[in-house]
Amino acid sequence: MSAMPALLAVIHSVGLLTCFALLGTSRIGACIRFLSIQGILFSLVPVIAHDDGLTLRVLLLAGANIGLKGVIFPAVLLHLRTRAGFHREVEPFVGFVASILFGVVALIVSLTLARELHPALSHAPFVMLQAAIFLVAIGLFLIVSRRNALIQIVGYLVIENGIFVLGAITVVETPLLVELGILLDAFVAVFVMGIAVFHISREFGMADVDRLNTLRG
Amino acid sequence: MSLPHLFAPVAALLLAPLFVGLINRTKAFVAGRRGPPLAQPYRDVWKLLRRGAVYGEVTTPLVRLGPVLNLATLLVALLIVPFAGAGAAVSFTGDLIVLVGLFALGRFATVLAALDTGSSFEGMGASREVHFAALAEPALLIALATLARITGATDLGSIYGAVATAGWAHDAAALALVGVSFLVLELVENSRIPVDDPTTHLELTMIHEVMVLDHSGPDLGFIQYGAALKLWVIGALLIGLAPLHGVGVWFALSLALLGMAWLAVAIGMIESAMARYRLVTVPQFIVGAATLSAVAFMVLLV
Amino acid sequence: MTALLLSLTVLSLGGVAALVCVARAALAHFLGQAAAIVGSLLGLEAAISVLLAGRPYSISWNWPMPGGGLHVEIDVLSAFFLLPVFGVSALTALYGRSYLANAEPGAASSWLHLNLLTAAMALVVVARDGLLFLLAWEIMALAPFFLVIFDDRRESTRHAAWIYLAATHLGTTFLLVMFVLLANLAGTSDFGGYSAVLRGNSALGSAVFVLALIGFGSKAGIVPAHVWLPEAHPAAPSHASALMSGAMIKVGIYGLVRMLTLLGMPRPWWGWALLAAGATSGVLGVLYALAQHDLKRLLAYHSVENIGIILIGIGIGVLGLAYGHPALVALGFAAGLLHVVNHSIFKGLLFLGAGSVQHAAHTVELEELGGLLRRMPWTGACFLIGSAAIVGLPPLNGFISEFLLIYSGYAGLLLPATVIAAAGLVTLVAMGLISGLAAACFAKAFGTVFLGAPRSGEAEHAHESAPPMLGSMVLLAVLCIAIGLAGPFVVRGLTGVVAAASGLPSTEIGAALDPASGSLAIATALFAVLVVLSALLWMMRGWRLARAGVRRAPVWGCGFRRPTVRMQYTASSFAQPLVTQFRLLIANREAVVAPEGYFPAAASYASDSGDPFLRLLFVPTFRWFRGVASRLNVIQHGHIHIYVLYVAATLIALLAWASL
Amino acid sequence: MAPGYAIDALLFVAVVGALACLVAQPRPVLAMAIAVSAVELGLAASLWVAVLAKGPATAEDELFFVDAFSAFHLVVLGLVFLLCSLFARIYFADDGEHGLTKSAARRFGALWLGSLAAMVLVLVSNNLGVMWVGMEATTLLTAFLISLHPNRLSLEAMWKYLLICSVGIAFAFIGTIFAAASVQGGLGADALLWTRLAAPETQFDPTLMTFAFVFVLVGYGTKAGLAPIHSWLPDAHSQAPAPVSAMFSGFLLNTALYCILRYVPLVRHALGNGFADHLLVFFGTLSILVAAGFIVFQRDAKRLLAYHSVEHLGIIALGYGLGPLGTFAALFHTLNHSICKALAFFAVGRLGQRFGSHDMHVLSGAVRLTPLWGFALLVSILALIGVAPFSIFMSEYQLLRAAVGAGAWLVLTLFLFASSVVFISALRHLIDMSFGDPKGALPFRDGTGAIAAVAVSTGLLLLLGLWMPSWFVVALGRAAAAVGGRL
């Protein structure tokens, strides 16, 4: 398929934009929506990256992914936000400007790293490789730099996206079972984390992880 | 065991009290008094032996055993201490260790006997006794070690034999030093001035006297006779160093007796000339003696 | 050999049985004691038969444990060290049951630890395989832990147990390294293989020697690794202390000697190291003992001193080997090894005596005791004999070994080589100081505890101990005298052991020992004369006094007519001159309120003889280390996002490192 | 039963048990846990025997694969779960806040057996992807076991565990992908099958494999509690109910380490150098040192045990890095540590219930308070700090042999230093907890279940310390050979 590189490039650029949006926005709701967009976008990657025609299996997986990451997870998170009555603001440890600067740095680093790795993974599209690394980095950064448990879940899901992309472009064919297992895990993970956050917010009044530091030493 | 070998112990038994008497007489003379007769110590001992005894209320048989054991050890010591190069009645390699052991045994017995009375004065005396003894014992061992190194023998008989003959030829310096430390030991072991004043009447300053304060009768007699013997024994060790080279045995023996007399006078002079050290300085005195012997030993090594 | 295995089985099973029916105390006590005595007697039989036959028995099985094998052998050396182990064990067992009579019900379980300790010591002595040795060694280290913490309600006891096990474990670490290293190089953990790799390689030899000296030394109680003794011995029940001090620390000496036999030709500096360690331990041990006013602490420090004496002997022997003087070898090793047995006898006796005192007066604090000789004559007499023996007075066993040691010192003096002569002088000075100070210390100990008037109500109402306790003490006392009088034969009898320990032919050893035993024969004769003379004098004064009469009166109080018991010289005041003289080394902490003015107000004196090395070296070190460690807290601050950052950072660091 | 069926049965029993718990009554739940664990242990044992006799077994066309290495781990898993289930019954039977409500009991049973199933899946899966799925599943399933009794602290601990381990596991997946991608020529659909990857003819891309191992190590290492990425561990262990803590220390950590070990042979084969071994040795030693430091000033008994886990997992990792003999030692140590640590958590857990605190300044006089658990506490901690005649002494001896054999003197020194530090500090804590008069708690006795658990554990510790059966040596040797090369 000749359109493939172009499409990938589009997904890539929009995906990066969502990342920067995640870094920049101060509103939880916005974060969650950006996450869903990102999820949908990258769920398409396997469909496009497949050079040997579209099998039912690929479509099925892509569909499942879109369903989860685009619809269910955001729904869960939004529900949580209202139920747990969070502040609407994100309260970062690291300011938004700084976060965006980090994004830029991460972008450069990911580019170099991707260039490092690409020879080894020759059949993987370069842009996606870079995107995967970038997503993991951003996800980590969100977890580390944000006070709010919800955003940490968001960060985790961003990493999840990155890994998904990586898997999709490197290991071309993994057994269906594994794929489903991974999806299932992601699914359960979100729910478990959600319940956890719910409990926490009920105990602590709000899921401000900064308060979770009584256990030391 | 020939006649001269027997002569030494017998002489000691007979003359030891006289030795004490001579010291006292000298002191009196220097002080310008007539002083007690030379035979006074004999009379004292004899008188005490005939007296009854008084014991503290809390005492055990140990208080009686002490003087006996002490005297016995000294009697045995007489057998192994050579006199004037004539050799000793009993002589075997390592007998000097036995000598030290005997002294230790006698002292231990005396000290326990003192503690048995439960009187604080005896306790004080015993404490001082063991303190100084603990320092004197290494001094004695080193002095003997030096002699052993000089003569290449480890039995007093041959040591003194060799000293009297060859010793002074090459190791005069070392021998002189050892002699001095023996003199010090003589004063220390027998609690003479400048270490202790046997004639003082202030208990708090005494060492040996206060330790035997509550002994009486025969026990005290044993103690006094024992003290005289100990003076004699260590004196013999000192006098034995004298270079009596190449004279006949009997002549040597008589010279040695003269030497003992001279020693008694010397001690008398020292006691009259010196004041008693403060108790805290006594250890330095003893350690000094040990150092002298050690120095002597080093002289030999280099 | 079967006797030995049988005894090990009996000991272990009996111990377990005692634990199992601990609910029925009487039965448990009976089982434990019976097993201990029977097992020990069996073990003694095995040891003696080997000593008589003179040839070793050996058994080995296959042990699935990789890097180990079950190889045990009783040779003359092992048999010799089995004597104190089983001998002391039997007597302490005889003593222990009455001692524990009115302890709390759970006390019967202590038989398990006591018997396991004996069995483990025996196993250590006969083990010929690195791993087996270590296993036995560790059990031997663990069993006493439970004996030390016997009276666990007291904080001081728990502290003591901690110090004990910590110290012994640190020592074991060095042994672990030593055996693993040897096994690795030899390709086998069997002792037989070690000497092969050690003979050629002198650097390895020195390394192993150092490891052995530290590892075994910490068990034997060499300064500064002695800190556990003064804590553990007072805490444990007295018969356990007797076993630990009488036998267990000797096993450390055994290990050292055994390694020396495997190490082959020693380097001179090994001898010097042993000599230095011995002299230091000896002198410092007795000095610290002087400063004590707790009878069992005092005895514990004397163990340090006697271990020092033993090491001096072995050091002289090693120097003799290194410089090729068989006479020194024979005398040095003979002195050291004989002192091993002697010390286990009189130290066992003294600890049992201390136990009886504690049993009778409920304290071993010297300043609370006094006048016990009239209340407990048997215990007092035994303790007196023990004291005289440990001080090295003729004609008791202590004198024999110290005679040999000083004798070897003089023998060294006569040799032309300056080095040896210097070693000889060191020996003499050390021995002179040690014996003088020891005499002072035991005059103080015996004097304050048994003589004078009782200083407290408990001491006032003290009672004599039960017959079994007296029995074991009397037996030990008799042994002290017997060995003392049989000196010449004993010394000749040592030939085989000394040959085994030094590796020289026994003919050579015998030739070197003969003069010494000859002199001892004469010396013994002299002591006979001494006894006769004393008897005569005694009868003479008795005869005199029968006529002249005896009466009792208050002692001279300098005119003061009402002396009270508090006016007696106390232990502290007795030792004060020496303690002050050596205050630099003893570092005693004193709190003095001196009386002032003509009408002084209350005056007081308190001295705390906490071990200087513990106080000034180990405790500060540990405190410092704890401070350093607690700085780690900063990385465990509880902030989750930083934790995640750790993960990321680790990942990035590794990636960076890997891509280099 | 044929090995293949045994493998299926292992999974099936666990899953069914877990589902059954969802509908059962509280009491049966705990009984069922015991029964299921017992069955699992039996199956695992039979599987082990079969594997030792007939070599590795596979099932479901190579989706599952069990060799001596995983069979051994399965047996340990079964044993630990049996002991922990036995104890859980005693623990939860005790009244007070630790009693289980109906829903809590169901939740516990389901999650407990669910995590058992997940771990079995990890151990038997031949497909590295499936292994990863299982590992992630353990995280998600055990999370709520920590906060079985929700309160601020347990929730905090649970959240940290959940988030940190999820992130770690995510990295592990990246590693998995890289490993699969590093195969040259591509194995197609079999790219994740361990048997294929481990086959001698497989060729790898060194760079990718290097990266892969780094990711795997950090990822699974987070879960295994290797320093410095152990930070979740003390919190989780201290806040979880004692049986759960015991299970965590007893086997969850080993499962994570097992996953790393599956990659080690591949890396050795791919790079042909000691890259993997050096990393294992490094992290092992680091963990031992860090843990030692924390043990020195610990106040909370369960945190103390948690840091002991860090230390011992470090020891095991160290062993795996020290060649065949080291691997043997590590496996031996795995068994010893699992039993010992479970026992320790039981004892501390029971005491904590009665004292209402795990502060070691509060715990005291265990031996007088409850002879059984006091004894258990003494034995387990003494064994933990390496006192003979308990088996940990022996496994550490084997480790020392390996270290000396490898000439790793620095590591040897550091290890001995750290273990001495641990010995001294932990011993002090042990004495304070075990001896003296119990203040603030009444004496109590536990029934046959407790006695059985204690007897079995101490018996095993003692037996393996004194007389290791020769067939067991052979079995361990085989297991070591599967991942560490032949002895």
Image (cartoon, helix red, strand yellow):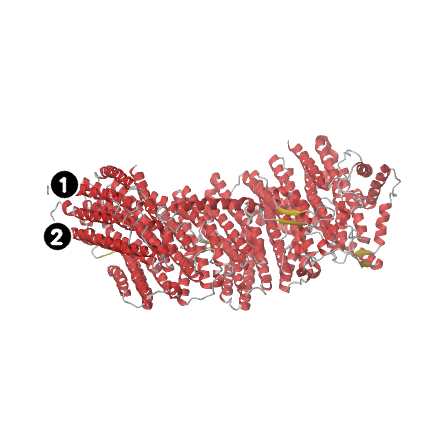
Classify the position of the C terminus of chain C by image quarter. Answer: top left
Can you give x and y, in whole percent of width and height, for residue C146 in the image?
A: 51, 58
Q: In the figure, is residue C638 to the left or right of A163?
A: right
Dot 2 or dot 1, earlier in sequence: 1
- Identified by mark 1, the residue type is Pro
- The residues bearing labels 2 and 1 have C-alpha atoms spaced at a distance of 22 Å
Q: Which numbered marker is on residue B206?
A: none
**Above-or-below relation of A58 to D96:** above
Residue drawn at (16%, 40%) of the image: A9
Q: Are marks 2 and 1 on the same chain?
A: yes
Within 10 Å of disc 1 (Cα), the crowding (few <14, some 14-19, many 20+) is: some
Can you give x and y, in whole percent of width and height, for residue C609 in the image?
A: 61, 48
Q: In this figure, which residue is indicated by the disc labeled 1?
A: A5
Would you identify the image quadrant in which residue A80 lies? bottom left
Can you give x and y, in whole percent of width and height, for residue A180 in the image?
A: 20, 54
* Residue D121 visible in rendering: yes
Q: Secondary structure at mark 2?
A: helix
**Above-or-below relation of B38 to D312:** above
Q: Secondary structure at mark 1?
A: helix
Q: Which numbered marker is on residue A56?
A: 2
Instruction: Give the camera-side residue of C354 and C192.
Output: C354
Residue drawn at (55%, 68%) of the image: C26
- Identified by mark 2, the residue type is Leu
